[in-house]
Image (cartoon, rainbow, N blue to C red):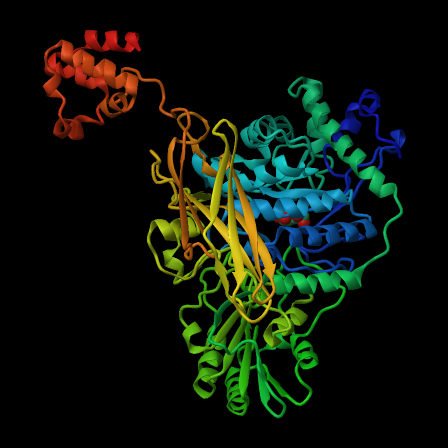
C-alpha cells in the first residue's frame, strides 16, 4: 500500500472516525477505517522477546502468546555493556516481529533503577542514564532499521510498581533532567522511536498521560520527537485532557467512552478540531510507517540462529562477582560435580508480567553442563530447597549436604523465585530466600570448592554469604538460552565479561531511596534527588559489595595511560577524545570494558562526585594489545541549571577518570574548559559574593567603597560573614557609607 495521503484522508474522515482513530481498535491493534482503506497495525510486547497474542489479550502476561525467542532481560543485557550486542538482539526481535505481523514492539523499557526494590528492575537497564540510553538507542535503532517500530517506555519517572497507576512521583526538575529523562532524550534524538509510551503514574501531581510539559514541551518542542505518544495500557483517565497534553493513542480502547467524549468535546467547542486532527495525523503516520513492512513478504523464521544469539547474549550478560580460582571448573575424569538447586533443572530465565515470553525452546542448565563436561566426570543433582513450597526443606537440605560431601566441586543454582519479583509489585528486601541461604551454609561446611550461580532480575544482597564460597556468577534473568550460557562460562568455553549496571550495596538501608520508597498516600518523594545508585554511594562514601561497572574475568587486563585531545569548544562542537591502550595480560582471550567518568570539582552547584560519560568494550586474545577511543561531547560536562532553565558547562577544571569499574579508576586526567559565565546578571539582590566573583562587579563595587573612603571596610573576615547577603540588604545597613542610592548607581553602571 502506497504511503497514506494523510492530508487527503484527514479531509475525508468524519468526526466519529477521527475519534475512533485516537483510541485503539482492540487490545493490540490501532483502529482501521475500512471505508477509506486505512488498515490497522499490530503492537506487541515486549522488550526482550515477543509476546504476540493472536486472539484477544491481556497486559500482564497471564494469557498465552505465540512462541518467540526469549532473550536476556534488560538488566542482563545492560550488564554486557555491549552496544553492538544490544543491536543484534534488537534486529532479531524485529525479525521475529515481522514473522508474526507485529509492527511495533513495546520496548525498550528504560526507567532508572531508583531503588533495587522495584519489581520491574529486571525489565530496565541501569541506575545510570548514560548506560541505559546508549544500550537502548543501539537496540531501538536496530529494531527500526528492520522497518519495525519501538515504544520507548515508560515516560516518565515510573520507578516503582507499588500503586503505579495513581502514585505521584515528586521529582525536582534538575533531577528529572539529569537522571530520569536523559535516556529517553538519547533515544528520541538518536533514532526517532516510532512511539513513546507514557507511564501510568503522575509526575508532580499530573498524570503522565495528561502532562503537557512532558508530552509536548520537553518531548516534542525541546527534543524534536516526531512520532506518536501511546498510553500505557489503561493509563488514560481523561481522553480530552490527554489529547490536549499530547497523548495521541489510548490503549486499550475505552470504546463508547473516550470516543464519545472526544466527539462531544469537539461538537461543543471544548476541544479544538485541530488538536484532534493532530492526534489523528500521528496515528495515520504510524500506520503509514508500518505499511511497507506489513505489506512485504515476512522473512523466514530464524529461531535457531536467534537461540544461538540468545546464548551468546546471556553469556556476555553474566557478571563474575567473585572467583578464588574455583572457576572455570577444572574437573578430570572420575571426579564428581554436585549440582544443587531447582533452577538447574527448571531454570528461572525471565520475569512475570507483560514481558513474559513463550520461549521457542528452553535450555536446561544441568543437561547443558552434562553436554559440556568431560564424559567421565560424574554429575549429581539435588534440589536442596523448595521454591514455592518449603515443607520438604529439611529432607532436601540433608540430601544436598550428602551430595556436596561426596563431590569434588559443588555448583549451587540460587536466585529469586518468580514470586519474589514481577511487574505489579515491588520487593521489600534484598535477601535470597532463607532456605537457599541454609543450603549454602550447609554446603560450605562440607565443601571448600563451591560456586554460586545466581538467577535474579534485580540485585540480591551478597555480603551476608559470598565469603563462604569460592566463586559467584551473577546471571540475571538470562533468557531461554541461559542454561547453555552458564555451562559455557562454568566450563571455560566462554569467559565472563559482564559489568554491573547496578550497584550491589552492602545492605538495602544504604540506598538513599530507602527513606522514600515506595512512598505512601499516593505520593513518593524523590528526596535523594540526583543521588541514585553509585552517585549516592560515592557521595555518602559508602562501601559496597560490588560497585557499578565491576566484573571479573578469567583473564586480566591492564590499561595504559590515556591520551586526551580536545577539539572544538563549549558552545562550538566540543569533543574531548580519550584514547586508552588496553592489554590482555592473562592466558585466555577475554573482553574488557573501559569506562570514563567525569568529575566537576569546580562546580558552583552540588554535583555527583563522578558520572559515567563514556565506555567502550574491547575483546583481546591472550597477550594481545589494542586501544579504545571514547569521545565526550558538551553534554558530558554539563549540568541542568534550574536558574537558567538550560544545560550549562561551568568553566574550570574537569577530571576524566578512566578504569574498569566506578571504583577502579587508576587513570585521572585533568582538563580545563573555558565557557561563558553561568552566573546570572548582577542586580540589587545579588549577594556580595556574586558581585565580588564577577570581574566587572568587583571593580565597580570596590571602586564605590574606595570613593566613600571605606575600601578597608571589605576584608576577608567580614566577607566570610556577610558574603551571602544581598547587596540590597547591606545597602539598608549603610555600613561603610554604602547605601541604596550608591547601589542603584552601581547597578545602572553595570
Ligand atoms: C503493561 C506494561 C507495559 C506493557 C503494556 C501492554 O501494563 O506497563 O510495559 O507494554 O501494559 O502489555
Q: 1 above or below 115? A: above
Q: Is residue 219 visible?
A: yes
Q: Residue 259 at what x, y percent from top left?
A: 72, 31
In front here: 565 or 296? 565
Q: Is residue 730 left or right of residue 643?
A: left
Q: How many marks?
A: 0
Q: Residue 361 at what x, y percent from top left?
A: 75, 67
Q: Quadrant of the C terminus?
A: top left
Q: Residue 140 at what x, y percent from top left?
A: 67, 45
Q: 295 above or below 623? A: above
Q: Residue 215 at what x, y percent from top left?
A: 59, 31
Indicate the quadrant where residue 306 lies.
Answer: bottom right
Q: Is residue 661 left or right of residue 685?
A: right
Q: Is residue 127 visible?
A: no
Q: 233 above or below 422? A: above
Q: Is residue 287 left or right of residue 109?
A: right
Q: 556 above or below 595? A: below
Q: Residue at x 45, y 63 (%)?
A: 430
Indicate the quadrant where residue 671 lies.
Answer: top left
In front here: 522 or 50? 50
Q: Quadrant of the N terminus?
A: top right
Amino acid at each position: 500500500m502506497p504511503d497514506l495521503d494523510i492530508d487527503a484522508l484527514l479531509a475525508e474522515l468524519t468526526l466519529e472516525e477521527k475519534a475512533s482513530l485516537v483510541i485503539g481498535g482492540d487490545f493490540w491493534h490501532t483502529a482501521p477505517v475500512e471505508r477509506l482503506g486505512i488498515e490497522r497495525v499490530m503492537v506487541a510486547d515486549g522488550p526482550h522477546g515477543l509476546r504476540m497474542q493472536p486472539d484477544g489479550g491481556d497486559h500482564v502476561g497471564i494469557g498465552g502468546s505465540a512462541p518467540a525467542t526469549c532473550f536476556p532481560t534488560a538488566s542482563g543485557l545492560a550488564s554486557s555493556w555491549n552496544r553492538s550486542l544490544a543491536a543484534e538482539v534488537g534486529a532479531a526481535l524485529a525479525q521475529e516481529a515481522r514473522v508474526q505481523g507485529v509492527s511495533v514492539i513495546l520496548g525498550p523499557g528504560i526507567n532508572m533503577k531508583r531503588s533495587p526494590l522495584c519489581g520491574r528492575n529486571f525489565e530496565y537497564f541501569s541506575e545510570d542514564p548514560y548506560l541505559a540510553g546508549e544500550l537502548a538507542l543501539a537496540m531501538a535503532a536496530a529494531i527500526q532499521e528492520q522497518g519495525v517500530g519501538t515504544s520507548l517506555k515508560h515516560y516518565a519517572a515510573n520507578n516503582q510498581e507499588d500503586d503505579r497507576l495513581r502514585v505521584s512521583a515528586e521529582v525536582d526538575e534538575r533531577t528529572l533532567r539529569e537522571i530520569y529523562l536523559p535516556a529517553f532524550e538519547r533515544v528520541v534524538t538518536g533514532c526517532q522511536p516510532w512511539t513513546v509510551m507514557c507511564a501510568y503514574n503522575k509526575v508532580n501531581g499530573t498524570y503522565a498521560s495528561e502532562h503537557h510539559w512532558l508530552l509536548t514541551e520537553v518531548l516534542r518542542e525541546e527534543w524534536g520527537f516526531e512520532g506518536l505518544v501511546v498510553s500505557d495500557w489503561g493509563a488514560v483517565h481523561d481522553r480530552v485532557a490527554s489529547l490536549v497534553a499530547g497523548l495521541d493513542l489510548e490503549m486499550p480502547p475505552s470504546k463508547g467512552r473516550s470516543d464519545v467524549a472526544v466527539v462531544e468535546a469537539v461538537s461543543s467547542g471544548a476541544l479544538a478540531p485541530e488538536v484532534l486532527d493532530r492526534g489523528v495525523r500521528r496515528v495515520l503516520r504510524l500506520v503509514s510507517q508500518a505499511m511497507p513492512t506489513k505489506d512485504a513478504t515476512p522473512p523466514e523464521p530464524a529461531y535457531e540462529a536467534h537461540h544461538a544469539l540468545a546464548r551468546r547474549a546471556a553469556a556476555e550478560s553474566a557478571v563474575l562477582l567473585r572467583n578464588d580460582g574455583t572457576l572455570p571448573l577444572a574437573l578430570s575424569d572420575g571426579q564428581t560435580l554436585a549440582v544443587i538447586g531447582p533452577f538447574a533443572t527448571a531454570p528461572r530465565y525471565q520475569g512475570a508480567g507483560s514481558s513474559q515470553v513463550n520461549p521457542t525452546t528452553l535450555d536446561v542448565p544441568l543437561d547443558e553442563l552434562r553436554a559440556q563436561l568431560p564424559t567421565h566426570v560424574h554429575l549429581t543433582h539435588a534440589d536442596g530447597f523448595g521454591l514455592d513450597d518449603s515443607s520438604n526443606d529439611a529432607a532436601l537440605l540433608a540430601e544436598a549436604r550428602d551430595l556436596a560431601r561426596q563431590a569434588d566441586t559443588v555448583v549451587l543454582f540460587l536466585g529469586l523465585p518468580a514470586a519474589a519479583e514481577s511487574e505489579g509489585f515491588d520487593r521489600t528486601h534484598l535477601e535470597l530466600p532463607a532456605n537457599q541461604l541454609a543450603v549454602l551454609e550447609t554446603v560450605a561446611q562440607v565443601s571448600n570448592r563451591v560456586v554460586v550461580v545466581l538467577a535474579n532480575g534485580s540485585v540480591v544482597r551478597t555480603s551476608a554469604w559470598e565469603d563462604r564460597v569460592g566463586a559467584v556468577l551473577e546471571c540475571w534473568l538470562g533468557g531461554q538460552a541461559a542454561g547453555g550460557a552458564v555451562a559455557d562460562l562454568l566450563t571455560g568455553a566462554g569467559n565472563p565479561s559482564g559489568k554491573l549496571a547496578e550497584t550491589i550495596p552492602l545492605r538495602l538501608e544504604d540506598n538513599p531511596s530507602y527513606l522514600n520508597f515506595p512512598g505512601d498516600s499516593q505520593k513518593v518523594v524523590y528526596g535523594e534527588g540526583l543521588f541514585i545508585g553509585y552517585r549516592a554511594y560515592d557521595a555518602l562514601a559508602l562501601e559496597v559489595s560490588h560497585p557499578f561497572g565491576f566484573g571479573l574475568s578469567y583473564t586480566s587486563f591492564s590499561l595504559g595511560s590515556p591520551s586526551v585531545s580536545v577539539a572544538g569548544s563549549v558552545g562550538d562542537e566540543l569533543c574531548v577524545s580519550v584514547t586508552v591502550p588496553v592489554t590482555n595480560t592473562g592466558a585466555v582471550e577475554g573482553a574488557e570494558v573501559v569506562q570514563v567518568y567525569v568529575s566537576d570539582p569546580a562546580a558552583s552547584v552540588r554535583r555527583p562526585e563522578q558520572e559515567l560519560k563514556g565506555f567502550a568494550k574491547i575483546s583481546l586474545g591472550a597477550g594481545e594489545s589494542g586501544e579504545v577511543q571514547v569521545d565526550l561531547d558538551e553534554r558530558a560536562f554539563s549540568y541542568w541549571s534550574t536558574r537558567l532553565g538550560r544545560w550549562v558547562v561551568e568553566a574550570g577544571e574537569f577530571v576524566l577518570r578512566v578504569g574498569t569499574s566506578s571504583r577502579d579508576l587508576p587513570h585521572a586526567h585533568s582538563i580545563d574548559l573555558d565557557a561563558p559565565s553561568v552566573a546570572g546578571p548582577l542586580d540589587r539582590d545579588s549577594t556580595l559574593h556574586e558581585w565580588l566573583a564577577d570581574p566587572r562587579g568587583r571593580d565597580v563595587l570596590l571602586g564605590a567603597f574606595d570613593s566613600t573612603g571605606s575600601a578597608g571596610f571589605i576584608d576577608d573576615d567580614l566577607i566570610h560573614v556577610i558574603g551571602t547577603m544581598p547587596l540590597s540588604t547591606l545597602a539598608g545597613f549603610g555600613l561603610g557609607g554604602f547605601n541604596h542610592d550608591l547601589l542603584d548607581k552601581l547597578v545602572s553602571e553595570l
